[in-house]
Amino acid sequence: MTSADPGSDGAAPVRDVIIIGSGPAGLTAAIYTARARLAPLVIEGEPSSTSDQPGGQLMLTTEVENYPGFPDGVMGPELMMSFRVQAERFGAEFQTAKATRVNFDERPFVVWAGDERHLGRTVIVSTGAQSLLLGLPNEERLIGHGVSTCATCDGFFFRGQEIAVVGGGDSALEEALFLTRFASKVHVVHRRHELRASKIMQDRAFANDGIEFLWNCRVSEIHGDERLEGLTLTDTVTGERSALDVTGLFVAIGHRPNTELFADWLDRKPNGYLVTQADSTRTNIAGVFACGDVQDDCYRQAVTAAGSGCQAAIDAERWLEAHGH
């Protein structure tokens, strides 16, 4: 059968590949599967959703300077639009809707998006992960304008500036240590008087003169119209409020993979990320593959997500060929 064969009920075509998610991983998978003439359907998410929007987290990023091939940098939305146009050029089809339900017991697999029911011989899951935020006014609006969730991505923009990192785990200290390469001072804001981070990370951070710890504090206000202009801190013990004049805020309180949709079907790690088999993108269900930040709890970079999207496409193509499609 071809990728557009009618389903057994005559209502929906059976597609060779359905891709759920349209960040760097999903769109790279779309480019590769489309070039292989598999006519993928990409369920790209909804623009109104912060956790499942077309283009993924890069749509919230201003300038990307570490993606290969762009020596002068590129705007995050522009980069993702280029990915999308390239996938469309080779025949990928897009549905701007949120995937709401799946059934991986049936073959072909069933994926619901909006009011539509789709059938697919393979499914590539690339729903990504979302950075946990503080939930304060101005926070999301100022992402890319002084507020960030990724030091590796944005630290270079804060050369010689005074900045703050919120968090107390290994990730927060890794961010703070990395940022001392650029910033004149890094304030680590933590709501308790002891860190959750491992001892080796604490020792490194305490030994770094570029880091100052602000204990028993939480960020209660984020100030700025066009860019971040400063913070208000509240003492978690006394309730006393104070100003912190910084031009950068890095929120490092964790990530949440967008895996709820697959909780009843796919194996997950204790932290919620999807489990894939060693050296592949295969999940515990044959014909279902996962790529990008939804299964990567280590690197979480656009370029690594794109690479795993390529892997998922090749894995899906080989699976289809091995099963006579």
Image (cartoon, rainbow, N blue to C red):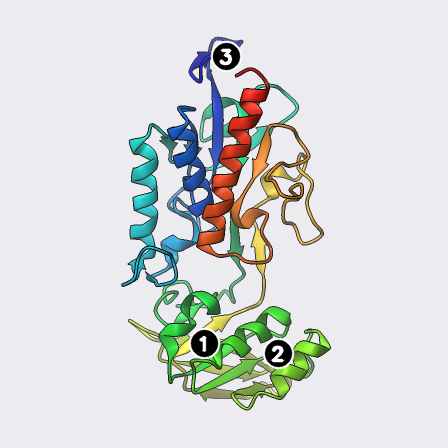
* Amino acid bearing label 2: Arg
Is label 2 in a helix, a strand or a loop?
Answer: loop
Of label 2 and label 3, which has the lower sequence position? 3
Q: Residue at x 53, y 50 (%)?
A: 293
* Residue carrying label 3: 7
Q: Are marks 3 and 1 in contact (CB under 8 Å)?
A: no
* Amino acid bearing label 1: Glu
- Which of the pair 192/290 is nearer the observer? 290
Of label 3 and label 1, which has the lower sequence position? 3
Q: Residues within 10 Å of mark 2 (few under 14, many from 20)?
A: some
Residue 297's spot in the image, x, y percent?
Answer: 60, 55
Question: Depth-wise, is mark 1 or mark 2 nearer the camera?
Answer: 2
Is label 3 in a helix, a strand or a loop?
Answer: loop
* Residue carrying label 1: 221
* Residue carrying label 2: 191
Determine the CA span between mark 3 and mark 1: 54 Å
Question: Depth-wise, is mark 2 or mark 3 nearer the camera?
Answer: 3
Quadrant location of residue 22?
top left
Q: Residue at x 29, y 39 (%)?
A: 85
Residue 188's spot in the image, x, y percent?
Answer: 55, 81
Q: Is residue 139 left or right of residue 167?
A: left
Q: Residues within 10 Å of mark 1 (few under 14, many from 20)?
A: some
Determine the CA span between mark 1 and mark 2: 14 Å
* Amino acid bearing label 3: Gly
